[in-house]
Image (spheres, coloured by chain):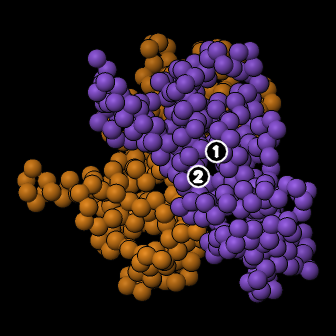
Amino acid sequence: MTEVKVNKWALKYYRPLTNEVMLAIMDEVKAHIAGSGNKTVLSSRDEAYALASRFDGVLYRPFFKQRPMRILGAIIDRCGEAHNEKVLERLYIGKEFIDQWGQVFKIPPEDVIKEYITPLLRLHILKPSDRPEYLYRVGMEFFHLVGPLAQFRAALVDPEKYREMRAVVNGILSIYVVAHAVKSKIHGESARIPWFLRLSMLYTLSGLEPRVAQIRIRDILELERINYVDKYFVHEKGLPVELWRSIREEAFEFMDRNKVIEDVTSEGYKLNDIWIRMHEEGVRRYVQRLLRRYRGF
Amino acid sequence: MTDMSAALDFRRITYRWAFLRGFAGEVIKSALDAVKGGRVDVAQYFANLLYFLPFSSTSVEKVLFYSLVKAGRGYVEKDPSLYEVKASEVPGFDPDEIYKVKTAFEFLSRLGMADLVAPDIIRLRLNTIKGIVEPIAPFLAAKDLNPQNFNPDAIAYPYTVISGISALSVMDKTDRLPNSFTVMAGLLSPTVHVERDGTIKRKTVIEKDEWILARSQMSKLKQFRDKFEVEYFKAVGLLHENRIIVKTYPMEVSGTLVDMVIAPAYDRYYRLRRERIISRMRK
């Protein structure tokens, strides 16, 4: 058995690295789904969907407020109705609906647009309406994505298919929200990547191969590596053991449910290919940022 | 003038029968290479293929099953002499069929799963014991087996692996492939492509357009005539049953299979093609 190498550099700079990975993931998903920005890693929209489905269920933790989810729930249901009855009229959102959202979800009326609608606009879920009598319109891409989802009251939905499509939608939203939290942190707020997600990323990043020309991450996660990362954080960083236990449990539940861990081999856990590639891209971006800062180009 | 460094992808492979058949043959060879390299788990993706081949001999399956169950007993009782199997003791063969057992023995030793001690005796190797026998041994020995600690995946794993290995061996030896397997290889071919400079690009997601194009190109091949639909459904069934398809929205296939089998198959196929083109130009 060969000796398992752990990249200590990645562990030491875990915070900027995970942040950069999250931003890279959002840029890539945005480039493929909303069509803005450069496509660097993935080759198609389907791959972006596959990547997004890896982030299913991040938002359901008590980590974020429930209100954006409720508004989104209303929008998804609306898309389903429009898809089912073939009435595109339903995709238009007027002033009275926005007032109603404020009322029933108990949001102060001045915050509705600023805090809840603007993010949806940036994600291209909502777009400015092309009809003067309405304020917003649901984006066609989002409609095509979730329209077939909310059919459960019109037709019997295959649960397997429903779960997989739902995972994609939920994953896109999760990526968006987490990456936005990271971005606002750069502007001076607190960090917002939940620990179970950050730990899953750290297990991956610790497999960064040292001193090779091209940035590469091993796709086999060995048990020794897991133990090393845990020891590093508990012994050297001094995190409480019991907290770490709960985080580790959550992280493995997350990786298993969303198929980040694809397989168990005799050497270790086999990690998903797209997941690995995005992490490599994140490291590349971080290194480029460092170079730019120190060399000035 | 032919382009020497042409790119290679599924559009070319599924376009003609000769390309598709050649590629499927390379898939078998690279799967066998992976098994020889110690990755026995790759074989499970090829389980149950044998039953689509008419008149195929199942001797490897019989021999391997018998020796593994015997070795499982040996593992539990800590008796290494049970790792050895004589040709005459394998059940399910007539006395005049002993040559079949011997060819199966030779194949297993060629595959690196067992050593030939004498022409009619094999001993299982340590990696076989660790990889396949260890998981089943507790179930062979357990006396208090109750439904709560019964893990069907663990106990069915050796069965799928053995079924896959025997399918691979028969297809490799006879050089006959079931049409459903050829279709399956064609459907999986969009996961990899070779670029103009010879670098191999892998992915695990098959896009809708790629799947539809691969399917429609294969349905036009003359060799399938009117039975393409049947073979297509068999192939999709196999893809699902052998757990090659991991997710359907978007369509995602097992990364291990792509890394260990499809990408090496492309590599072999690409190099063969280049050699052929170069030798043709020399003439």
A76 and B123: which one is in front? B123
Residue placed most toward the observer, A283 or A114: A283
Give the chain letter for orange: A
Query: Residue at left 42%, top 36%?
Result: B272
Residue A205 locus on image (x, y percent): 39, 63
**With respect to residue B275, does B117 lie above or below?**
below
Residue A98 in the image: x percent, y percent?
Answer: 54, 31
Q: State the residue at coordinates (46%, 37%).
A: B269
Between tags 2 and 1, which lies in front? 1
Q: In this rendered view, identify the residue nearer to me: B249 or A20.
A: B249
- Name the amino acid, label 1: Asp
Residue A218 horizontal side relative to residue B30, left or right: left
Residue B264: x %, y % from top left:
47, 46
The dot on residue B32 is: 2
| Left or right relative to A279: residue B112 | right
Q: Is residue B106 visible?
A: yes
Front position in the image: A215 or B3: B3
Marks 2 and 1 close (CB-CB < 8 Å): yes
Amino acid identity at mark 2: Leu
Q: Which mark is residue B172?
A: 1
Element type where label 2 sits in the image: helix
The residue most toward the left is A296
Disc 1 element? helix
